[in-house]
Amino acid sequence: MMRTVDLIQKKRDGEELSTQEIQWLIEGYVDGTVPDYQMSAFAMAVYFKGMSMRETRDLTMAMVATGEVIDLSAIAGIKTDKHSTGGVGDKVTLILAPLVASFGVPVAKMSGRGLGHTGGTLDKLESIKGYQIERSQEDFIKQVQEIGVSLIGQSDNLVKADKMLYALRDVTATVDIIPLIASSVMSKKIAAGADSILLDVTVGDGAFMKTIEDAEKLSETMVALGKEVGRKTIAVITDMSQPLGQAIGNRLEVLEAIQIMKGQGREDVTHFICELAQLMLELAGVEKTLEEIHEHLVNGKALEKFEALVAAQGGDLQDLYRPSTAKVVTEIKAEESGYIEALPALEFGLFAMRLGAGRAVKTDALDYETGIVFEKKVGEAVESGETIAKVYSQEILDKKLLTEFQKNVKIGRVQLLPKEIIKVIS
Ligand code: URA
């Protein structure tokens, strides 16, 4: 008879678990026969001893089997999906999904919520009055058939093991380990049913992966998992050493996404999103130049699709364009002249969280209106006294917070040239 304690011990001693052992453990965890305390000991053993590729694949498939697998075959064409391993100011999905859909490639995506310093697409969408993230499977499919795009929350019936395991990992310091992240992400993507998957693997201060080597390893693992089950999968390693684009905070990020979809966004983030769109389209067999893709931002095609998406999910199109109602806007000025050398994503993500834009625990209520908008980013010159950022808050910022903000803006003599896409792994 199999016993959980023996499997924990096996992993603790650095041995490989068999396919059956992994299946037994995951099934037991989901049906309640393996308690949380044993699963956390197991997760910690994996944290220290790792898993082979075979074990990671078995874990992923055992997790997929703990819920439904969505059948998207009723939707014509190659269905696409994307996933980010998390970041600060990451509003990519809001733009990328309608942009790709505006070329006739269906995007059927389930998104997640933010936690801690990272943001989540669902929270950003819910900052739009009326937007509903819950949809039945039939409605989800019908919407993609009708308008080519749907962005919803993950159904409770999908990958039950991940919901339980992720909550456990979150409170047992076992989130940031490659086999557990890879199986968590890929089990959800496989269950969500799309034919092709673009993985945005963030690296840097504000991401789970702190080094390029680790990001490469995670990317290779996830790409291999996707391909093994017949999904076209590529990973893009992207910079999360500073926040993405200008805004952090739910409403503020929706507004930045709209700016980008009007062709009026920052050049770097706009270019980055066009590059991701090109890759996603390519996965679906559609070849487009960056110019052709950019044209859909300038001519309103992507924004039109975004409006159709918001309307289809109950969102109020007038509220969509409403500015933030945060009561206080504080301009942060440069204290010296030079180049911005660093804007650490983690620190600013945590700062925005304290303003109410993020959650410390899953049950925290969000303030959709608060956050930060950067006017200067890494590599740009500033004069002393020039505005670097605007902070949107509900109360006047106290001196301690202001000092902390200033401390995190690094101004120096070196002009760095940040690159959004570091590497593509396919
Ligand atoms: N995102 C996920 O979905 N799972 C992880 O484990 C980490 C990031």
Image: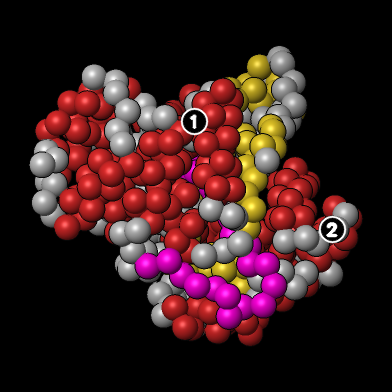
User: Disc 2 beta carbon < 8 A from ligand 1?
Assistant: no
Find residue 288 and report its horizontal and vertical position in percent. Answer: 85, 58
Here the colouring is: secondary structure
Residue 98 image position (x, y, % from top left): 67, 68
Which secondary structure class fits the magenta region best? Answer: loop
Q: Nearer the viewer, mark 2 or mark 1?
A: 2
The residue that mark 2 highlights is 287
Q: Amino acid at mark 2?
A: Glu
Disc 1 crowd, CA 10 A, few/some/many (<14, 14-19, 20+): many
* Callout 1 secondary element: loop
Judge whether residue 198 can be spotted in this image. Answer: no
Image coordinates of residue 23 in percent, x first then y, are 28, 47
Q: Dot 2: few (<14), some (14–19), or many (≥20) neighbours within 10 Å? A: few
Give the percent coordinates (x, y) of residue 170.
Answer: 28, 41
Q: Residue at x 24, y 19 (%)?
A: 13
- Which residue is located at x 40 percent, y 75 percent? 134
Q: Secondary structure at mark 2?
A: loop
Of 219 and 93, nearer the camera is: 219
Q: Is residue 273 left or right of residue 153?
A: right
Q: Quadrant of the N terminus?
A: top left
Whether residue 77 sits left or right of residue 29 in the image: it is right
Q: CA distance from mark 2 to mark 1?
A: 31 Å
The image quadrant of residue 65 is bottom left
Residue 148 appears in the figure? yes
Q: Is residue 264 left or right of residue 400?
A: right
Locate the C terminus and report the quarter of the image it occupies.
top right
Pointers 2 and 1 in contact (CB under 8 A)?
no
97 relative position to 161: left or right: right
Read off the magenta span.
Answer: 68-88
Residue labelled with disc 1: 209
Residue at 25 percent of width and 41 percent of height: 21
Q: Nearer the viewer, residue 358 or 230?
A: 230
